[in-house]
């Protein structure tokens, strides 16, 4: 079956409109920096389009975009692995909001971020995928290229840790 | 509690791109889409005919398994001397082995085969109705599979494919470089110390039995610890599984020697089993049951005693001077 260039463009733009916010949320809670998260999301879409423009087919756009973004986050962390969480929070968390409501929201975001950071690195991405991005275990397994069983185990382990922190 | 967690993480869903940020990305994308236009492409629709054509062998195997499913499933539970044992080793294992591609999968498969043969030998040790010839044959196969399993596990770190697997895993394992890197080193260390402590000091039957049981108790704990350690690299896992298998084999051989009253042999097997366990414990970042870990010191001390004694033998070159604990 043939798909026209226009059709592919339309589908890609639709994916951007639907997925840019969830992908940004995913990046934001992983890198703790709004500006960097925005750049990573843009780079993710750019790389994906490059891939499409080479005539390569993407069977599951959502999973593909999350995979690309996840790899970009990993690369980012590799570059910055020596920086501590405090440093990241100090110089990274810089939301351009004003007003009481936004301050409360920022505090809440920081709280969520701290809980996420307290989970073992391996399990952290699973928690973000499940509870921040709202993906199913099957979708997470597809993105991480792991079995559903492995994802469930990681999720369970991470949840135990989160429960301890939220409800000590 | 799940509601509470959902509620807690709901706070995160208010994080969105601002209109301006979204507009910027959109503009950048549109400009890139203009620069790199896409042509019409052929998209894949799933065609069974194409699948069967491209995967002839796999299809054939599925058909064979479907037709002979019941037999092959039953054969999996067969032991030497059973009617279906031949199907288990000559058909099922050959088919499964065919799918083990790549050095890691092959090493895993050899370990699986070695474990299967060990189960067979353990079964035969209690079975009186099976002929000595079959018993000998299975024993030989156990030794052969053990050799292959050790060889393929040890060769893993030298293959390029393994390096690819490591980089693949390190990519997937996101931010755990600091956790995974030491494991590579530990695994190399694990290989270096491969052949220590096999010379014999004659201990009493009871003491050997106690030490053998102590190692035996650790096996399920260690197996669990290996399975639960998600940050370990595949090569390290194979190395640990190899040691686990060697420990299990040595435990069985020690029990067998103890039954026959061959204390010297038994002791050498017990020490082998203990060495393998120590290597695993040294490599694993944690072992689940803390109460079991409490016995480790005692266990390690005993091993150290034996190690020290052996060292003094090597230095003095006088084996006769070893103090017997018996």
Image (tube, coloured by chain):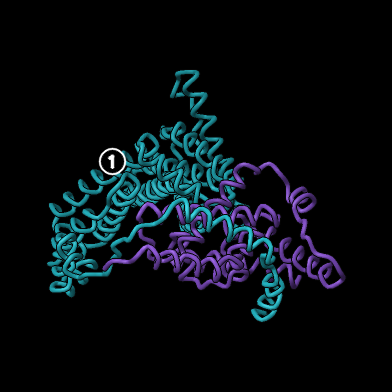
Chain colours: A purple, B cyan
Q: Position of residue A167 (x, y in %)?
A: 75, 73
Q: Secondary structure at mark 1?
A: helix
Q: Residue furthest top?
A: B316
B260 or A110, nearer to the observer: A110
Q: Quadrant of residue B62?
A: bottom left
Chain letter of the residue beneath label 1 in the structure image: B
Q: Position of residue B108 (x, y in %)?
A: 34, 50
B212 or B102, nearer to the observer: B102
Which residue shows up at 14% across the image and 72% down it?
B68
Say whether residue B8 is visible. Answer: yes
Residue that carries the numbered disc 1 in the rendered image: B147
B209 or A32, nearer to the observer: A32
A8 or B245, nearer to the observer: A8
Say whether residue B81 is visible. Answer: no
Which residue shows up at 64% across the image and 57% down it?
A38
Q: Position of residue B300 (x, y in %)?
A: 57, 42
Task: Bin the neighbour count of mark 1 within 10 Å (Cα to Cα): few under 14, some 14-19, many 20 and up.
Answer: some
Tell me: residue B217, above or below residue A133: above
Q: Position of residue B104 (x, y in %)?
A: 35, 47
Q: Is residue B244 left or right of residue A77?
A: left
Tell me: residue B283, above or below residue B125: above
Q: Residue furthest right?
A: A100
Quadrant location, the N terminus of chain A: bottom left
User: In this figure, what is the number of numbered marks?
Assistant: 1
Quadrant location, the C terminus of chain A: bottom right
Which residue shows up at 27% across the image and 69% down it?
B45
Tell me: residue B267, above or below residue A152: above
Which residue shows up at 35% across the image and 60% down it?
A57
């Amino acid at each position: 079956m043939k798909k026209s260039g226009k059709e592919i463009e339309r589908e890609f733009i639709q994916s951007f409109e639907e997925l840019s916010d969830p992908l940004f949320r995913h990046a934001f809670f992983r890198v703790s920096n709004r500006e960097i998260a925005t750049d990573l999301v843009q780079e993710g879409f750019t790389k994906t389009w490059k891939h499409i423009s080479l005539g390569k087919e993407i069977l599951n756009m959502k999973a593909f975009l999350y995979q690309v973004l996840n790899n970009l986050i990993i690369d980012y962390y590799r570059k910055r692995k020596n920086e501590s969480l405090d440093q990241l929070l100090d110089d990274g968390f810089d939301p351009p909001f004003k007003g009481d409501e936004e301050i409360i929201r920022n505090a809440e975001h920081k709280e969520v971020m701290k809980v996420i950071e307290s989970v073992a690195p391996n399990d952290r991405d699973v928690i973000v995928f499940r509870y921040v991005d709202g993906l199913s275990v099957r979708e997470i397994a597809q993105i991480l290229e792991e079995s559903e069983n492995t994802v469930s185990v990681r999720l369970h382990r991470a949840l135990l840790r989160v429960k301890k922190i939220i409800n000590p | 509690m799940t509601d509470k967690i959902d509620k807690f993480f709901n706070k995160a869903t208010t994080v969105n791109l601002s209109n301006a940020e979204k507009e910027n990305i959109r503009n950048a994308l549109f400009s890139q889409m203009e620069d790199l236009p896409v042509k019409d492409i052929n998209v894949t629709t799933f065609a069974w005919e194409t699948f069967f054509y491209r995967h002839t062998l796999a299809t054939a195997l599925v058909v064979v398994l479907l037709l002979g499913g019941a037999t092959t499933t039953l054969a999996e539970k067969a032991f030497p001397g059973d009617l279906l044992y031949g199907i288990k080793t000559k058909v099922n294992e050959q088919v499964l082995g065919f799918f083990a591609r790549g050095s890691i999968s092959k090493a895993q498969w050899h370990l699986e085969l070695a474990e299967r043969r060990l189960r067979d030998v353990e079964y035969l040790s209690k079975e009186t109705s099976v002929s000595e010839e079959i018993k000998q044959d299975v024993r030989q196969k156990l030794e052969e599979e053990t050799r292959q399993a050790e060889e393929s596990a040890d060769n893993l770190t030298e293959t390029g494919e393994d390096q690819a697997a490591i980089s693949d895993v390190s990519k997937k394992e996101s931010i755990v470089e600091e956790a995974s890197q030491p494991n590579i080193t530990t695994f190399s260390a694990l290989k270096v110390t491969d052949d220590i402590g096999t010379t014999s000091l004659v201990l009493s039957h009871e003491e050997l039995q106690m030490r053998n049981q102590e190692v035996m108790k650790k096996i399920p704990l260690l197996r669990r610890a290996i399975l639960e350690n998600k940050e370990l690299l595949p090569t390290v896992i194979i190395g640990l599984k190899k040691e686990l298998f060697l420990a299990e084999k040595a435990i069985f051989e020690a029990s067998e020697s103890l039954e026959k009253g061959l204390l010297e042999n038994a002791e050498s097997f017990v020490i082998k089993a203990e060495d393998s366990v120590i290597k695993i414990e040294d490599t694993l970042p944690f072992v689940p049951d803390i109460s079991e870990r409490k016995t480790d010191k005692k266990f390690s001390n005993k091993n150290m005693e034996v190690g020290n004694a052996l060292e003094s033998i090597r230095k003095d070159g006088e084996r006769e001077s070893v103090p017997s604990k018996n």
